């Protein structure tokens, strides 16, 4: 993942990532947050879109290719993607709350165990992406092994999502082996 422009506040960047689920509107991995109106200081959420390399060229005003995809079309496609993702989130939530209805002491315990493990995984995830040194990143990733005995769907989902994000940016073979192993 290439670095987004420094002028975009972290909170807004996170929101763009969440709404787009790290994807360009074409379904490819998003590489860069693009300022639709060409003004990189306009960090209004409506002016931002996560796009892949291909569509960055497409959208770039500098390249004179703006005719291929005008700002209105870009926003339209982005909003369609956001809407699809919202639907997916709602469905997932519906599914999750359904399972919650049949709660017993035993699965309440399992659910809280899952929740605490997921919090730890999120911490690992944060530490991983904050760290720029690949050797340190490798060490951080190793911590996931602790949870490999606890195979619940919810935890696996969290780990797999994290690992696929890691795989997207991975360059070292150590990390690749580690992912395969986990
Ligand atoms: Zn694209």
Image (cartoon, helix red, strand yellow):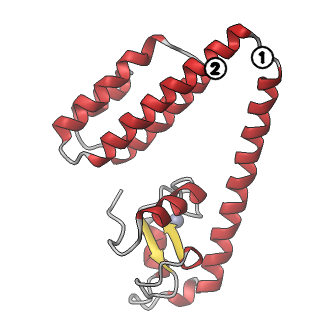
What residue is at 47 percent from the left and 62 percent from the top?
Answer: 11
In-front residue for pair 93/173: 93
Q: On screen, 8 above or below 98?
A: below
Residue 90 point in image, percent of width and height:
76, 46
Residue 133: give x, y in percent of width and height. Answer: 17, 44
**Residue 51 visible at all:** no
Q: Residue furthest top?
A: 106
Q: Residue at x 40, y 83 (%)?
A: 40
Q: Secondary structure at mark 1?
A: loop
Above or below 6: residue 70: below
> Which mark is on residue 111?
2
Q: Nearer the viewer, residue 176 or 67?
A: 176
Which residue is labeled 1 in the image? 103
Location of residue 80 (image quadrant): bottom right
Question: Viewed as shown, does residue 32 lie left or right of 70?
Answer: left
Q: Is residue 16 left or right of residue 7?
A: right
Image coordinates of residue 143 in percent, x first then y, are 32, 24
């Amino acid at each position: 993942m290439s670095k987004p422009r420094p002028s975009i506040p972290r909170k807004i960047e996170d929101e763009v990532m969440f709404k787009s689920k790290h994807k360009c509107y074409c379904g490819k991995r998003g590489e860069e947050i693009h300022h639709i109106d060409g003004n990189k200081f306009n960090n209004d959420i409506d002016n931002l879109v996560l796009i892949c390399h291909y569509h960055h060229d497409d959208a770039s005003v500098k390249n004179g290719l703006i005719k291929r995809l005008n700002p209105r079309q870009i926003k339209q496609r982005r909003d369609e993607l956001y809407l699809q993702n919202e639907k997916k989130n709602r469905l997932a939530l519906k599914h999750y709350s359904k399972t919650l209805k049949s709660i017993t002491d035993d699965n309440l315990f399992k659910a809280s165990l899952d929740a605490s493990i997921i919090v730890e995984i999120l911490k690992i995830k944060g530490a991983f992406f904050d760290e720029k040194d690949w050797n340190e990143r490798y060490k951080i990733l190793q911590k996931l092994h602790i949870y490999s005995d606890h195979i619940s769907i919810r935890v696996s989902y969290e780990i797999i999502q994290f690992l696929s994000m890691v795989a997207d940016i991975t360059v070292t073979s150590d990390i690749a082996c580690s992912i395969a192993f986990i």
